[in-house]
Image (cartoon, rainbow, N blue to C red):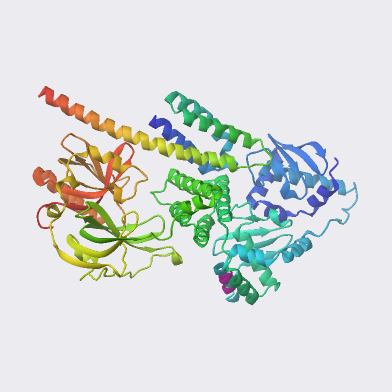
Amino acid sequence: MEIPQTLRAALLSADEEYLIALCNKGTVNRAKKDLAAVRPELRQTEGEAVTVSVGDAVCTITAPLGSSTCSCPSSAMCRHRMSAILWLREQAAQENTAPGEAAPPEETPDTAEELIARLSACPPQALIRQLGERRVAALVQRESSGEGAAIREASTVTVELPWIPAVVRLLFPLEHSSCSCHSQSFCVHKAEALLTWQLRRGLVTADSLLEASRGDAGSAPDRREICAAVQTALGDWMRAGLTRLPASSQETAERLAGLCHTGSLPALERAMRRLHGELQSYFARSAAFRAEGLLRRLSEVWRLASALQTAPEQEARRLAGAFREEYQAVGSLRLYLLGLQEVELAGGYAGTVYYFWETQKHRYYAYRDLRPQFYEGSRQSGHTETILWELPGTLRQLWNCRIDLTGARVGGEGNLSSTAQCRGTLVQKTPPGSVLPPQAVEEEFSSLLPRSRPGLGELERLAILRPQRGEQQPYDTVEQRFALRLLDGAGRDVWLTVRFREGRQAMLEALEQLAGQWEQNPALRPVFFGALYREGGRLCLHPIECFTDWEGTP
Amino acid sequence: MNQCISEMEAALADLLQTGLDTGAGSSAAELARLAERCEACGLHTGSALLARLSGLLEERAHTLHKQDGPLLELVFQTEHYIALCRERWQETEILRGWQERQEQDTEGGDCA
């Protein structure tokens, strides 16, 4: 059999380590097993490539081996290609050995030396730019403290980055290097592995790296580059699939969110953080995780990145969104603190949201006391509530109180600013029924449907319901969910549902107690304040507050 | 129709689970079958999207140099379409439930 010279040299120089670096150990072992059952067939030789059929698949093997292709769906090095390479290597080795003679010394270029030369020649500036200042500083810190990567050199350079965790196998040519994150591009882990190797070899110094990274800090990445990076990551994940998704994808999502932040793309950053939350939920094996939900987040990020990439400058600025809401001065507001709830958002923020009713404009406002949770990867404890607008107490203490604000500033969606220019006066504690007009309380549910549309802001979905009657449902032990069916006079229903979660026990107990009281006393007519949403074919209410004596003392 | 939307969503979720590199072949056949069901349910856009998706997945399985950009674009476009259909269906379903309840109450009232 005639194997082209270049391919023969590549095959003979590829040892086990090199083949594993092209894909992974599992694929190489699987290919060996396949070879015992299926014998590949040589189809044709064209130029420097050889076409081999392995079972149903047709592989074109060429030098460098990483450029070989296969007709199977896999876009990465598959078992068919590996079987074909192993088989061809066997044939090349046999041809090299005449019968009865010992194998002549291989006249192949020294791959290891070539690899070392190629890795040494890689300019550190490009790697530094890819990693960013923070990551370079962490790399230097780890190296100086002796907790750096584990590096093994042979025909390939294997770098283990246990803090991610990721294993990078660098080989010649560099573009065929593999990473346990399954990325087919030159991912950030590969860049980190290569820079660590250069630092360990003394090709660069810690000081020069830190200096170069600081010097590069001013060059913000381009919008299109960021969107392309985001889409590349999403493409890698879609190709690999959820079952083979590496845990390092969480770190990638977080890093890309940070990149969006640096590139002034707040809307994409928020979408990436929501996606990161969904990935965390998957890897934490959360019962609430749904593949459909993750797909929705991926779709949201992809479509936004696509739009940002192609949009002209002005439209792109609109799509990019704003980091902080632009607060507008609205003068005086007469507020009533109707309710509050603790929230933990998928985007990585947590805290308390306070809901107000404005008695003159007849609309809702909110003050969101939220803090990011994504710094240092853990919830920050010991957050103390601040006193706003020079009020005599914290907002929590002023529940069901009337508050007059002067010099108030409000964001586009109705979020109040905590600006020091705003002054608040506590009026008095008042029953909600004497502040909110009867038309703000829904006794008839037909008008609620348009207000539950997905995509509407939270404040637009707020509603106060006074049902005619309620039907408590058996507690769902599988979904761990409490449900109370609220009905208006015409039999239209809204489902009040609360899923059990840490910190919600008191709320569930209060709701169960209320449902029991209502059953005993149908004239109780409690009032529910919450946010509307849809689930399945049902209109639902997420409760924020319940009032058993709407007109009386709160 | 909801059954059809759910099946579409499940098929896309399956594709996400297995990944394009391994599950594309079997997904192509499933999506082609679903495209016919969508047409029968009156989801013409859904049917067209799924047929194109099935075609691209089938093509991908026999392509040496895979270009996944258009395929991914279509996957996420289909997901968006499903979300919009689901929103519409939910609205119809809630109204239907209310209507049924009112009719039951009226009938109950008439009997009484």
Q: Residue at x 19, y 67 (%)?
A: A425
* Frontmost residue, A367 versus A36: A367
A409 with respect to A85 (left or right): left
Count of numbered marks: 0
Q: Position of residue A17 (x, y in %)?
A: 71, 56
Residue A115 can be seen, yes or no:
yes
Query: Percent from the top left, x then y, of residue A255?
Result: 52, 60
Against A260, is B38 above or below? Answer: above
The picture places residue A111, in percent across and down from the top left corner, at 78, 59
Magenta stretch contains residue A487: no
Q: Which of the 4 quarters of the picture holds residue A118?
A: bottom right
Q: Taking A445 as reference, is A9 left or right?
A: right
Q: Which residues are magenta?
A: A136-141
Quadrant of the image for the C terminus of chain A?
bottom left
Left or right, residue A279 beside residue A89: left
**Residue A177 location, quadrant:** bottom right
Does residue A352 appear in this view?
Answer: no
Nearer to us in this view, A136 or A78: A136
SS assignment for the magenta stretch, majority: helix
- Front residue of A22/B88: it is B88
The x and y percentages for residue B44 are 47, 27
**Foreground of the two, A231 or A437:** A437
Q: At 69% across and 53% down in the image, what residue appears?
A: A176
